[in-house]
Amino acid sequence: QIKADLLQLLLTNPGERIMLLGYGTPLKDLMFEPNDETIRVQAREMIIRSIDLWEPRIAVQAIEVGVGSDFDDSLNPDQTVEDQGSILFIRIRFFDPEDIQEVQELVLQVPLGG
């Protein structure tokens, strides 16, 4: 359930939930930006802020943000190197502090247009 809630937090743009206008992560704001180091740092900071604010049930072990060549396990094995260059890859490793033995991983790919 926590993994599903984390995915919902990442895919919700702030302002989309009427009673919780600040809820979400503004990753959609990056969709037409070039996939460069500045955007990757910005995306990582957005994710950290959102999790800190809205998901106190998890402890983050690591957040990796990069391009396809940074990750061995692309969600779509048919992607070309050019396709992967326009996709922001996000991997979050986290755990429930009450169940430290099980580390979860969430992998997300955000298409960028720049």
Image: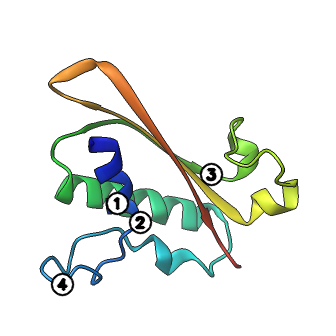
Left or right of residue 39: residue 63 = left
Name the front one of labels 4 and 3: 4
Left or right of residue 101: residue 7 = right
Q: Tell me the kind of residue under disc 4.
A: Ile
Assign a secondary structure to mark 1: helix
Circle 3 residue: 66
Q: CA distance from mark 4 to mark 3?
A: 32 Å
Circle 4 residue: 18
Q: Residue at x 62, y 78 (%)?
A: 33
Rendered position, 78 above or below 28: above
The number of callouts visible is 4
Circle 2 residue: 11
Circle 1 residue: 8
Name the front one of labels 3 and 1: 1
Assign a secondary structure to mark 2: helix
Q: Are marks 4 and 3 in contact (CB under 8 Å)?
A: no
Assign a secondary structure to mark 3: strand
Near mark 3 (Cα within 10 A), the count class, few <14, some 14-19 or many ≥20, is: many
Rendered position, 5 above or below 10: above
Locate the N terminus and report the quarter of the image it occupies. top left
Locate the C terminus and report the quarter of the image it occupies. bottom right
Near mark 4 (Cα within 10 A), the count class, few <14, some 14-19 or many ≥20, is: few
Q: Tell me the kind of residue under disc 2.
A: Leu
Left or right of residue 91: residue 16 = left
Q: CA distance from mark 1 to mark 2?
A: 5 Å
Tell me which label, 4 or 3, sits earlier in the chain: 4
Coloring basis for residues: rainbow
Name the front one of labels 3 and 2: 2
Q: Are marks 1 and 2 in contact (CB under 8 Å)?
A: yes
Assign a secondary structure to mark 4: loop
